Image: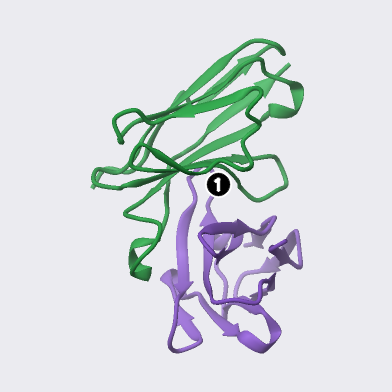
Chain colours: A purple, B green
Amino acid sequence: AQSVSQHNHHVILSEAASLELGCNYSYGGTVNLFWYVQYPGQHLQLLLKYFSGDPLVKGIKGFEAEFIKSKFSFNLRKPSVQWSDTAEYFCAVNAGYQLIWGAGTKLIIKP
Amino acid sequence: EAGVAQSPRYKIIEKRQSVAFWCNPISGHATLYWYQQILGQGPKLLIQFQNNGVVDDSQLPKDRFSAERLKGVDSTLKIQPAKLEDSAVYLCASSLDWQGPSTIYEQYFGPGTRLTVT
C-alpha cells in the first residue's frame, strides 16, 4: 500500500536557523507532491506543489522543496525560519487518484 | 473568492448518539472530499465526490458513517451511532476536478469540525 513518511513529529528551532523537513513516499508510479501547512487556529493551506519539470519548487513565504525521484523524497526547506513559521506541516502524495498524507511535523520556532 | 465553509466548528456528543456535519465547497468546484484527522495523524480520506457521484468511499465505515451530495454542491456527513474512536477533526475540501491538468487538482480546505465523543 502507498504510504508517506515524515521523519520528525516535532521540530524545535531558533529564529534564523535553517529548516529541512523530510518526506518519503512509497509508490512506484508517477506522483504529484504537495506540502500543506496549518498555522495555529487556521485551516490547512497549500505551501507548494510539484507536478513535473524542475524538481526544485518554490512556494510561499520562502519555502522550497526538492523532488528526488531516486530517493522517493520531497523534502521541505527554508534557509532562515521566522517565529511566524510555527505551524504543522504535512507532506502529501497523489498516488493514482487518492491523496496520501503523512502524519505531519509540528514545527516550533523559539523567538 | 469565498473559501470552503463547514459547520458546526465544534461538537460534543455522547457515544451512541448521532451527529451531522455540513460542508459548502468553493463555487464551481466539482470535487468534494471528506477527511477524518485523528490527533497526531495526517488526514485520512473518508469519501470523495465528483459532482453528486461517489468516486471513492473505500475507507468510509459504512456501518455507521454516511455522506451525500445530492445537488452536486453542499454535502453532509453523518455518524450514527458515534463511538469514542470517532473523536477527530472532520475536514471538508474541494477542488476544481480530481483528474486532468495538474493545476486543477489542488485541494482547498475548510476550517474543520472538531468532534468529541464522550
Is B113 placed left or right of B98 in the picture? right
As rendered, which of A46 and B82 lies closer to the eye? B82
Q: Where is residue B66 drawn, in percent x and y?
A: 54, 26
Where, quadrant-wise, is the C terminus of chain B in this rendering? top right
Query: Mark 1 highlights which residue?
Result: A40
As rendered, which of B106 and A94 lies closer to the eye? A94
Q: Is residue B20 above or below residue A80?
A: above
**Pointer 1: residues within 10 angstroms few (<14), some, or many (20+)?**
few
Q: Residue at x 60, y 35 (%)?
A: B89
As rendered, which of B73 and B3 lies closer to the eye? B73
Q: Where is residue A40 drawn, in percent x and y?
A: 55, 46
Is B36 placed left or right of A3 in the picture? left
Q: Where is residue B10 drawn, in percent x and y?
A: 54, 24
Protein chain holding label 1: A
Is A25 placed left or right of B45 in the picture? right
Label 1, secondary structure: give it.
loop
Quarter-of-image position of residue B61: top right
As rendered, which of A76 and A13 lies closer to the eye? A76
Quarter-of-image position of residue B12: top right
Residue A17 visible in the displayed image: no
Q: Residue at x 35, y 55 (%)?
A: B97
Q: Residue at x 42, y 54 (%)?
A: B107
